[in-house]
Amino acid sequence: MEAKSANTPVTEKKKFNLKAGMQSFGTKLSGMVLPNIGAFIAWGLITTIFVKGGWWPNPQLAKMITPMVTYLLPLLIAYSGGSMVHGHRGGVVGMIATMGVIVGTNVPMFIGAMVMGPLAGWCIKKWDDRVQDKIRQGFEMLVNNFSAGIIGMLLTIVGFLLIGPIISGLTNVMAAGVDWIISHGLIWLANIFIEPAKILFLNNAINQGILTPLGIQAAAAHGKSILFLLEPDPGPGLGVLLAFALFGKGTAKGSAPSAIIIHFFGGIHEIYFPYVLMKPALFLSVMAGGVTGTTLFSIFNVGLKSSPSPGSIISLFAMSPVNIWNYLGLLIGVAGATTVSFLISAVILRRDKSTTGDELAESEAKMKSMKAEAKGQNVEAAKDVMNQAKGIKQIIFACDAGMGSSAMGASILRDKVKKAGLDLSVTNTAISNLQDKPGLLVVTQDELADRAKKQTPGAAHVAVENFLNSPKYDEIIASLKAEAVGGTNETATAEAPKAQQDTPEDELNEIDFDKITEVDFLHHDQNIGSATMAQATFRSELRKFNKDVKVRNVAIGEIEDKDNVLIIASKETARRVKLQFANVQVYTVDGLLNATNYDKLIDKMK
C-alpha cells in the first residue's frame, strides 16, 4: 500500500448535489407537518361534520374550527420544527416565537411557523452551546428557564414586527397567484412538475411543505381547496400499476395487483415509484394522468376540506365536503387520471420488447456479482453485512417522512424477524427523527444513505434499492441468526473464496449424501416463482425413486445450519450461504429451472 504524500489532501470536497439538497430541505418541511397530520385530519373532520352545510351542522362545536386553524396547527408545526433542531427545549421556544407571527397577522401562519420554529430552535441551541458549560453548579435551572423565556420573548417581538408581515405579504401574493392560475384554468400545469418530483421522493415536501399550508388557507376562506388534490390523487399511479398487471412481465406483472391495493386503498404512493423508474418513459404516463385529473377537478369545481393522509381513495372521500356534485367530480377526476395514465402506460409496455421478468433480474444479479468479483468486493460485502449484525438490538427503517414505503419495509422485515425467532424491535421513522445510539441498525434507500449516516454515525447501516423488494433482508436475518448462536463463523468466511471457485463436480464430490434428509431451494424476493417450480419438479423426480427426503422452498433467513441440509441456489445466493453458514451443504446451479443441473445430483441421491 502506497504511503500518502504530505501534500495529498486528506479529504476531497464533495460537489453539491441539487437533488440531495432539495430532498434534505423537503425533509425538513415535511418533518414539521407529518408528525402532526392527525391534528390536521381532526380539524378537517370537525370542519366537514359540524360546519354549516356539513354532515351534521352544529354551531357550538363549529366554534372549534377557527381556533384550531389559527393557533393549534401552527403551534404544533412550530414545536416540531424547534424540536428537530434542539429537542424539547427548542420546541418550546419555537412555540413562543411563533405566537408573534400568529398575533401579528390575520392569515393562518403555517409558513410562519415553519420559519420561526426552526429559527428559535437554532437560536436556543447556539446559546446553550456557548453558555451551558459555563453555568455554575446549582444555577442550571434558573439560567435555562430565563434564557428560554428571554430568547423566546425577543423572537416573538421580531416575529410580530418583522417576520409576520413579510410572510403575510408573501402568502397573500402566493394565494393571489394560485387564485389567478385557478381562475384562468391553468392549475393543471402544476402536475407537469409535481408528478416527476413525487417519484424522486419529493412528494412529502411538495404536499406537506407547500400545498397543504396554501390549501388550508384557501379552505378556511372558501370551505374547500383543489390544492389538496394535486399531489394525493391516486389516479396516475393506479393507471401505471393496472398497465403492469395486464401487460407487464415477470416479477413486475406478478406484484402489480397487490401494489394496486396498497396504493389505491392504503394510500402508499411510494409503491408505484419503482415501476415508473423501471421504465422512465412512464414519466409521461403519470404526468398526463396528473394533468387530466387536475383539469377534471377544476372543471367540476372539486375540492377537499383538508389534506388527505394517506392519499387513498378512502381519505379523499373522507375529506370531501358533503356534496353529491363534489363526490361525483372527485370520482370523475380520479377515473380520468387513471384512464389516461393506463392508456399511455399500456402503449409503452406493449411496444417494449425487452425482457423484464425473472430472467432479467437474475442476469442483472449475475452481472453485478461478476463485476464485484472482478474488483474483489463480493467477499468483503458479505463480511460487512455480517459485521453489521453484531450487537444489534433495534432495527429502524428510515425515509424522508417516516411513513409510506419505510413502513412497508419495516413490516416485511418484522415478519422475517418473527419467523426467524429473533427478539428484535423493527420500526420506521423519518431520517430527521433518527437518534444515534448503540445497538441500532438503520435500513434506508441508497439515495438517502448518506443523510442517514450523518444523522446516526454510531449506528450500523444497510442501504437497499427498494424497501419493498430487497434480497438484503434475508442477508440481515441470516447474519442476525448467526450472531444469536455465537457470532459469525470465521472459518466459513476464511474458506469462502476457495468455495466460490468450486465446480459443480467438486461440489458433488464434497456432499455427504448419506446425511442428506432435507433439500432446500433457496430463493430471494425476485425469483421465488422459479424456486417454487424447481422445488416441485425436484420433489417429483425423487418420488420416482421412493426417496424419503424433505424438499422445501426457503429464504436465506430460514436456513437451519445443519449438515443434513442440502441447499440448492444460484451462483450469487450460493456465495452468500457459503460465507454465512458453516454446516449446510451447498450445490450451485446456473438457473433454478434448468433441469440439466439436477441430473447428476439425483443420480447420487438414488
Image (spheres, helix red, strand yellow):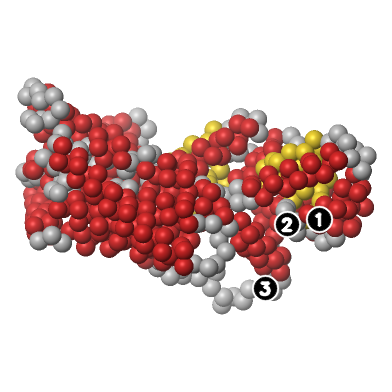
In three-dimensional space, the C-alpha distance between marks 3 and 1, rounded to whole angstroms, equals 49 Å
Callout 1 touching callout 2 (CB < 8 Å): yes
Q: Is residue 225 left or right of residue 379?
A: left
- Lower sequence index among marks 1 and 2: 2
Q: Nearer the viewer, mark 3 or mark 2?
A: 2
- Earlier-in-chain disc, 3 versus 1: 3
Indicate the quadrant containing the C terminus: top left, top right, bottom left or bottom right: top right
Q: Residue furthest front?
A: 544
Q: For residue 547, which quarter of the picture?
A: top right
Could you tell me the amino acid type at mark 2? Gly
Q: Residue at x 21, y 31 (%)?
A: 45
x and y percentages locating residue 368 in the rendered image: 64, 64
Label 1 belongs to which residue? 597
Callout 3 crowding tier (Cα within 10 Å): few <14, some 14–19, many ≥20:
few
Q: Nearer the viewer, residue 496 or 178?
A: 178
Q: Which residue is at a point 74% across and 34% down the rendered structure image?
A: 485
Q: Secondary structure at mark 3?
A: loop
* Left or right placement of residue 596 versus residue 202 in this view: right
Work out whether 487 lies above or below 9. Answer: above
- State which quadrant residue 312 falls in: top left
Mark 2 lies on residue: 591
Question: For the residue carrying disc 1, how many other residues have a C-alpha within 10 Å: few (<14), some (14-19), or many (20+)?
Answer: some
Secondary structure found at label 2: loop
65 or 246, nearer to the observer: 246
Amino acid type at circle 1 is Asn
| Spatial CA span between label 3 and label 2 | 45 Å
Query: What x and y, as percent, mark residue 348?
Result: 43, 65
Q: Report the residue marked by disc 3.
A: 3
Q: Nearer the viewer, residue 200 or 549?
A: 549
Of the residues shown, which amino acid type is indicated by label 3?
A: Ala
Label 1: state its secondary structure.
Answer: helix
**Vertical placement of residue 374 versus 397, above or below:** below
